[in-house]
Image (spheres, rainbow, N blue to C red):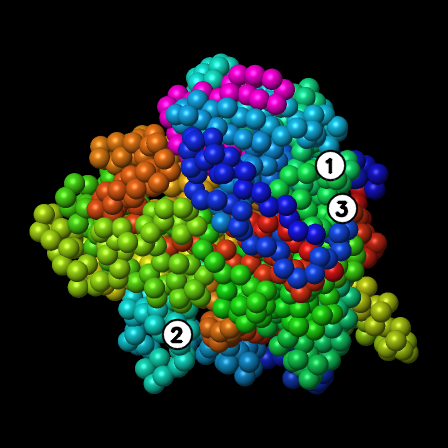
Amino acid sequence: MPDNIPSTSPTRRLEHYVAPLEETPLEEIDSLKTDGKPSNLWIDAWHDVRRRPMFWISAALILLVVIVALFPTWFTQVPPNSDCQLSNSNGAPSAEHPLGFTRQGCDVFSRIVHGAGTSLSVGIIVTLLVFTLGVLFGSFAGYYGGWIDSVLSRFGDIFFSIPYILAAVVIMSVLANYRNVWVISLAIGLFAWPATARVLRSEILRVKNADFVTAATAIGLSRFRILWSHVVPNSIAPVIVITTISLASAIVAEATLSFLGVGLPSTFMSWGNDIAQAQTTLRTAPQVLVYPSIALSLTVFSFIMLGEVVRDALDPKARAQR
Amino acid sequence: MKIKRIGVAAIALAAAGALALSGCTSGGEEPTGSAGDPSAIITTNGSEPQNPLIPTNTTETGGGKIVTSIFAGLVSYTAEGEIENDVAESIESEDGQHWTVTLKEGQTFTNGEEVTANSFVDAWNYGALFSNAQGASYFFDNIEGFSYEEDSELTGLKVVDDLTFTVDLVAPEADWPLRLGYTAYFPLPEVAFEDMEAFGENPIGNGPYMLAGEDAWAHDEKIDLVVNPDYDGVRKAQNGGLTIIFYASQDAAYADVQGGNLDVLDAVPDSALETYEDEFGDRAVNQPAAIFQGFNMPYYLEHWSGEEGKLRRAAISMAINREEITDVIFQGTRTPATDFTSPVIAGWTDELEGSEVLDYNPEEAQKLWAEADAIAPYGDTVFDLAYNADGGHQAWVDAVVNSIANTLGIQAVGKPYPTFAAALDDRENQRLTGGTRAGWQGDYPSMYNFLAPLYQTGAGSNYELYTSEEFDSLVKEGAQAGTVEEATEIFQQAQEVLLQDLPSIPLWYSNVTGVSADTVDNVVFGWDSVPLYHQITKG
Amino acid sequence: MLWYTGKRLLQVIPVLLGATFLIYFMVFAMPGDPIAALYGDRPPAPGVIEQIREQYHLNDPLIVQYFYYLAGIFQGDFGVSYSGQPVNEILARTFPVTIRLALLAIFFEMVAGIVIGLVSGLRKGGIFDATGLGASLVIISLPIFVVGFAAQYFLGIQLGWFRPTVSSGAPIQDLILPALVLATVGFAQIVRLTRSSVIETSGLDFVRTASSKGLTRRRVVPVHILRNSLIPVVTYLGTDFGVLLVGATVTEGIFNVPGVGRTLYQAVLRGEGPTVVSFVTIMVLMYLIVNLLIDLLYAVLDPRIRYA
């Protein structure tokens, strides 16, 4: 149980100090401290991350994007999708239109602001889907092994061997009349989770033979309990890296589907849609492509940094190093 | 080397005192510049044929380009879309219904077999036979004996002797010879009928080019054609051969011309429309082609039938700023439409009565829309315009719906279908919820081909269920007119009916946008947007 | 080990059936009549479409079509595409090209990704680490079609370093540029994975032991740290190989590579169920074999993992 070994917890590091025998009755050292606050992986992690500037920077950026997504009209009064005049096509910025115009003569800034909601939702829904399915399948398969592993892994293989961009194209075609954020998220996520499952499974294969697992078994914890409170938390680090990257990939995949013509309809403002449409004027009006790309990059950056920080905090081994 | 220029087609016909076809064809563009290396291979873009190379089953451009190069029909088209005799010596008729075709002597397929009357009659019979399920079978439906339901011989085709056959049509058709340069009418050698499928992989033709050996067709990559030394028609090649490279996207093909890996490109991608004319100077081409583009409002929709529908169609049409869209979105590579055909088609005009409905006129548009609202209020209904997303239509559809929305103050959106198949399905089954994009590329340079298949009551491509007795009878009359001039006049009247009803709201004609590398000369684009490959010289 | 391998090979069968049926079902459910669409704006005579539908069994129910297909497979016959070509030939033509492209891309992303990830991990928090992170972030957040077009335009056309598209026969030198573009996707992932794995491994006791017993860094890094950090990376490479085989849809289109991605995508758009399923069949097989190899490789990389 590494979480409860004081030496790995920076907040409760044991001093190598030997008290006089008469001050400290021997039984007190031998006994577990039971009256204090119980040590908890997640609480420890929180104590850790809150001291790191990167955490606050990325959290602030994410908060900003979320606020923009929820309340776009706080940031711009210009309509994103109506009042587009072709005479403004690819037009230069002005005071009212700080980032200029798209090829259709729509306001770039307004479209980015209004597109935040769609892109963020797609990213988050896909990530939740991929994470949930990936962790469930990966952990049971890796931990229990045997026929459970075979069944779960092969089930994952069925989805994984069909490339997800292709599957997304087909799903979006089949559900062409119902294209919305949920459908496109499902199309992207439904075939993307096995990657996460495989990474977690291989990590669990490695962790489940570790001493602390043997120790937990020895003190009589149920296998299921060991899986969730010890094995998974100790294997989750690479999954969190993959997951934050998959959030980025999902937002980007939305753009690729738009490029292939099966993305969200153009009535939906989304960064992906804008990037895909701006691609045709890459050579003549690159700025139209650059702005939504920057918005996307910053968002992706925030999530990945957050992922890094949380990963470090969750991983006792990485924490111990500092 | 100069091309042998002969005006046989029209002149022969006129001399025979039968029918004068659209103008004399001795003109055309004379090749200029150096003669070039007679063995140089020209590289150009194309796409993998969708079917084995059987003329009567080749209805798309990828295969059409190859089939037209390796076969020669009775006539072939000049750059202007006029016909000149190729294999035919003469095509004559007294009444436009009973035709006599005479072939030139001594022409052969590349396997040595003589091109005879039977080569045509058998090929046409094969193409028309119901159970052969050929894509172009309907091209023979005006020949006596054709059936859409069962196997039946084309009794209207009779072989007189080795070089002569007669054709009986079910009704007079003044410009019937205009069709004969189309792929469906090419001849086939006897060997083809032994195993048509195998023949389609390694076709043996009688055209200016032939396949360069057994493995000439590398599927999904390219096809190598070399000059057919025995061909002695009007399309004698000025180069040593043709390699058609198959591209999945126009962008890739354009990159290859820029990189010096491709000589001739006949379609510039969207992303380069703004720059290609600067980049290639006088090696860039931008001229109208036989492609009409518009969109249709289905007659089965609420608000879009009867008097209300007529008003709304006119209002929508006048709400679209065609000039601005062709300028900004297409960089001038589309020409705003003034009729339902194309400027390269004989008989095209911008002076049809009622064509002002195609001008941008916001006030009039709002007025007509209000009049329609007086009949039945449109309310908050969203106007949608369907298109297939796999065809690069999104930019102009968005621009058109924006123009409509801005002018009429209604909500208008584009409605993408993932594939052409999906869009077609809803059109065929009358399940549209709004307008639909509609395009037409002429099979052969005739007004009839732009009107009858699209707007006649019950016609094959009339999915939006337009019906007009006046139009139907005019088209029928035009088809059977004694002379081409007469026919043209009647077809123009028919179009004036269309301008009032607007079964399709004309938008623009697609231009040919092409470029060629400085390695080649004499690149001239035909009426069908395909370069006249045989004229190109290199080196 | 032999028993394990045999067992895994047996498990290929249900996966194959599951994946092929799933994709068959999905393509079947796509709207539109694929045969009618073959003829574009000009519909042929109605009897023509009906006869061709009959020829491809398209009028039969889904399950019957699927069994027609399965029956063919067991005879080694994948059927005929709607363009009249034997699917066997299409497969034999496209897979070698795509495999070459995928291997090249894997090579690029592996070399660059592992090296940069290793250095970043060893010097965590340094300038190199920050730069590497920044660079991989930019790459992740650019859609591949933007990277592809930009690379083609700048490296291919402007600078003329590479041929902008792949020429006939897809020789290796033409595949370098598309492979580099493809590699950008996996590159960022491998950098992140290697980095975090190296950081984790560096803190483990056996590494400390190795260092404290006086081994040079030159020996500790490759033998002790790298080898033990590669498990997640190798797993990722295995999955990425599968992705590359078809994830190349966009890239193959941009560079006109006559491979699986381009052909398969066209087949999907055309609604060619049998062709799509044939491709997926081969992909599933290759994917499963690659992953079996990778599972076996675990045992090599990590002595604690044993398969019985």
Q: Is residue B222 visible?
A: no
Residue at mark 1: B230
Q: Secondary structure at mark 1?
A: loop
**Helix, strand or loop at mark 3:** helix
| Callout 1 amino acid | Asp
Is B444 contained in the magenta span? no
In the rendered image, residue C292, in percent from the top left (x then y), is placed at: 75, 45
Question: Going by the image, does B373 lie left or right of B130?
Answer: left
Q: Residues within 10 Å of mark 2 (few under 14, many from 20)?
A: many
Q: Which residue is mark 2?
A: A101
Closer to us: mark 3 or mark 1?
1
The verdict on a common chain for dots 2 and 3 is no
Q: Is residue C6 above or below residue C239?
A: above
Q: Position of residue C150 (x, y in %)?
A: 61, 68
State the residue at coordinates (60%, 46%): B5
Type of amino acid at the residue the image marks with label 2: Phe
Q: Which residue is mark 3?
A: C96
Query: Residue B159 magenta-drawn?
Result: yes
Looking at the image, which is closer to me, B468 or C181? Answer: B468
Image quadrant containing the N terminus of chain A: bottom right
Query: How far separated are the C-alphas under marks 2 and 3?
Result: 45 Å
Callout 2–callout 1 Cβ contact below 8 Å: no
Question: Which residue is situated farthest in the left direction here?
Answer: B374
Looking at the rendered structure, whether the residues under marks 2 and 1 are on a common chain is answered as no
Q: Left of B293 or right of it: where is A189?
A: right
Magenta residues (range):
B157-183
